[in-house]
Amino acid sequence: MVVSRADLEATISRLESEVEDPRAGIYGPTSQSWKISKEAILFLGGGRAALLQTAHPYVAHGVDQHSATKSDPLGRFQRTFDNVFAMVFGDLDSAIKSARRVHNIHTKISGLIQENVGRFPEGAQYLANDEDALFWVHATLIDTAVQVYELVLRPLSYEEKDRYYRETRRFAYLFGIPDSVMPRDWGEFADYNQAMWNSDTLKVGKPALELRRFLFAAPKPAYGPFFRWLETMTAGLMPARLRDEYQLPWSPADQRWFRASVSALKLSYPRMPARLRYLPAYVEARRRLAGKTGPDRVGQFLERLVMVPLRRAPAKRRPRRTANA
């Protein structure tokens, strides 16, 4: 089923009725979602989430045919997270505006799968607002966040993970995803992910493999070691079958490097100052709730600093392929 504008407005209406403090947004400072999502270390799992998403042919071909990922990777990254952070940390009005903006963008994204891949034949149509594909993208973010949090910080109890998952259903409502598509609790959610990893719904095709190569290609030689390290960390976080299909290096040396890196992060990251650990979007949200006005200069500086390795020379964008092409 495809999420229509009416479907989106219905889930937004439900969300509005559930939110107690619109200033705090869909979660708020006492939520499990802010407790986990505020940690900058979650970006360590960004490569994993992206590769799990593009293992779904709907996502891979949609990104390949419509996205500015290759022609403007930094701009694409910033626009994506501007919307995500507005939904997670913004007030309710900001979250809803971003939800409608993203939905409108998705309504323009459709086309044909250009290969036989998994259970999808060449010529099959994809739609960005397909509710199952939308939930899969959502699931990769939630599952990866928990995985990285537990890997670097501490294990979460079942109750903590269940509370987190149940809260994040509100984030799914901002995409119009209905309850009928979503598992009821953390246990069912974990089973859903395992089933997806083993299913023929996920299959690494040509566009997905091309995007994986682009993702870990250093924009400058000086950044080569960092991107190679990021590739190793992503390989260690991936389900084995999909790691192999993406041809991610995973030699005994890579595995030792991964384990050593995790050990180092466990020791160093929790000891970092909170201002460096916590996302600027979270800090901005706390400032807003405290009645503080004006931009967060420290956060702006940190964001610019992080973006430096992501800058690439603009690439010529290929002509967009459409369903009639």
Image (spheres, grey):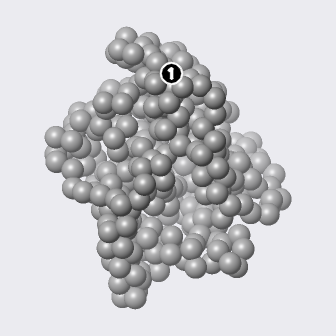
Residue drawn at x 40%, y 82% as measured from the top left: 257
Residue 6: horizontal and vertical position, in percent? 52, 15
> 22 or 142: nearer the eye?
22
Residue, far left:
158
Q: Secondary structure at mark 1?
A: loop
Residue 317: horizontal and vertical position, in percent? 80, 55
Residue linked to disc 1: 291
Residue 19: horizontal and vertical position, in percent? 37, 17
Callout 1: 10 Å neighbours few (<14), some, many (20+)?
A: few
Task: Relative to 149, say whether 109 is above or below.
Answer: above
Q: Is residue 259 left or right of residue 43?
A: left
Task: Relative to 8, say whether 142 is above or below.
Answer: below
Would residue 167 be seen by someone viewing this image from the given angle?
no
Would residue 269 be seen by someone viewing this image from the given angle?
yes
What amino acid is labelled 1 in the image?
Gly
* Picture quadrant where residue 255 is located: bottom left
Residue drawn at x 74%, y 63% as measured from the top left: 312
Task: Relative to 56, say whether 211 is above or below.
Answer: below
Residue 71: horizontal and vertical position, in percent? 76, 55
Residue drawn at x 21%, y 55% as measured from the top left: 155
How many labels were placed on the picture?
1
Q: Is residue 107 left or right of residue 139?
A: right
> 252 or 291: nearer the eye?
291
Q: Is residue 272 left or right of residue 204?
A: left
* Picture quadrant where residue 209 is located: bottom right
Residue drawn at x 65%, y 38% as measured from the top left: 109
